[in-house]
Image (cartoon, rainbow, N blue to C red):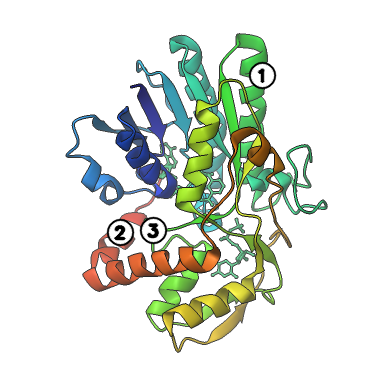
Amino acid sequence: MKRILVTGGAGFLGSHLCEKLLDKGHDVVCMDNFFTGSKHNVEALRARGNFELIRHDVTMPLFLEVDQIYNLACPASPVHYQYNPVKTIKTSVMGAINMLGLAKRVKARILQASTSEVYGDPEQHPQREGYWGHVNPIGLRSCYDEGKRVAETLFFDYQRQNKVDIRVIRIFNTYGPKMHPNDGRVVSNFIVQALSGKDITIYGDGSQTRSFCYVSDLLEGMVRLMEHPDLVGPVNIGNPNEFTIRELAEQVIALTGSKSKIVAKPLPSDDPKQRQPDISLAKAKLGWEPKIALREGLIKTIAYFDQLLKSGESAILDSHLRQPQG
Ligand code: NAD
Ligand code: UDP
């Protein structure tokens, strides 16, 4: 049994990770500033004796005795990370410095939740870990992409210079229950729009592609990397099944039986045209590959949002997200 800190632990991935670690018998400290995450996501965990919740901003130092740190704190949806771009880059960079400093001090192993966005709008397809990427340093997505790239640099420099025990995972588009209904990312947007009979908003012509991974698959890969004796990464974790955004919209309409219409909206700048992980490394070294196909994962996620929208709880979550963030 270990004592484990999860930063961003009240968010979509973080809350599922806290639950998985508790189920394995660990002591879990969940730290979050509740920008995009919510106490609602960890409500059921708060009754468990080996769970603690701390309101804290990762841009500030934190002193704790822990064995492992999963560093997930950072808004992940383009809508949210562009809401306060300076804060986003501070969260990635200062957050990494603070958590690496903590890991160094207490000799904890630390895992960084990096992203496929480090590949930018990729000119290599599918993307392997050795690809250095094609990122605009001054665009609207740069606060997130470059922040995450600097965080990776910091991880490897702390490893070389201070012998910090690091792990770096590059996460490709992941979806599932506990995404925020107003998250702004494509899977939750389409499902919420379809269930509430609103137009389904495709940005651009919908020919851009993404490869969607279900949350339980992603977390299994993440924990396997953390537990691996010597694999440091970066390791791509995602589902290589690639779909156009139009195909995704059509699947969501078919699975919900919705009468929503598809409408076109402008394509945001620097929106990557294609994305698919090469997961050979994860397969070979972690014995990991995703098990849940898009259709199966969408059915589970639709059931979650259907219940949430009917319960009226999404209104509480919405009002939370409108609060201004310093
Ligand atoms: P999310 O927005 O649901 O979760 C992020 C969490 O971090 C939230 O709980 C938020 O309140 C918290 N947070 C934000 N800024 C903070 C700060 N300054 N201090 C403390 N907490 C802060 O997003 P998610 O999808 O759960 O993503 C989790 C991590 O995984 C992020 O680092 C993200 O970049 C990475 N990631 C996710 C995906 C994906 O598809 N879900 C893909 C690539 C990378
Ligand atoms: N997208 C869309 N409609 C939406 C939200 C997103 O067509 O309502 C598109 C977006 O332009 C991008 C893809 O879906 O091409 C994935 O967007 P998301 O914000 O989920 O994540 P990204 O991979 O771009 O960070």
- As displayed, is residue 32 above or below residue 218? above
Mark 1 lies on residue: 157
Q: Would you identify the image quadrant in which residue 54 lies?
A: top left
Task: Check disc 1 and report its element: helix, strand or loop.
Answer: helix
Left-right relation of 70 to 151:
left
Left-right relation of 124 to 215:
right
Q: What residue type is labelled 1?
A: Asp
Contact between marks 2 and 3 (CB within 8 A): the answer is no
The residue positioned 50% from the left and 49% from the top of the image is 217
- Residue 311: horizontal and vertical position, in percent? 22, 69
Task: Check disc 2 and report its element: helix, strand or loop.
Answer: helix
Instruction: Pick whichever of labels 2 and 1 is earlier in the sequence.
Output: 1
Nearer the observer, 297 or 261: 297
Q: How far apart are marks 2 and 3 (CA)?
A: 14 Å
Q: Distance between the residues labelled 2 and 1?
A: 38 Å
Q: Nearer the viewer, mark 1 or mark 3?
A: 3
- Residue 9: horizontal and vertical position, in percent? 37, 39
Q: Which amino acid does label 3 sit on?
A: Pro
Q: Nearer the viewer, mark 2 or mark 3?
A: 3
- As displayed, is residue 6 above or below residue 189? above
Mark 2 lies on residue: 317
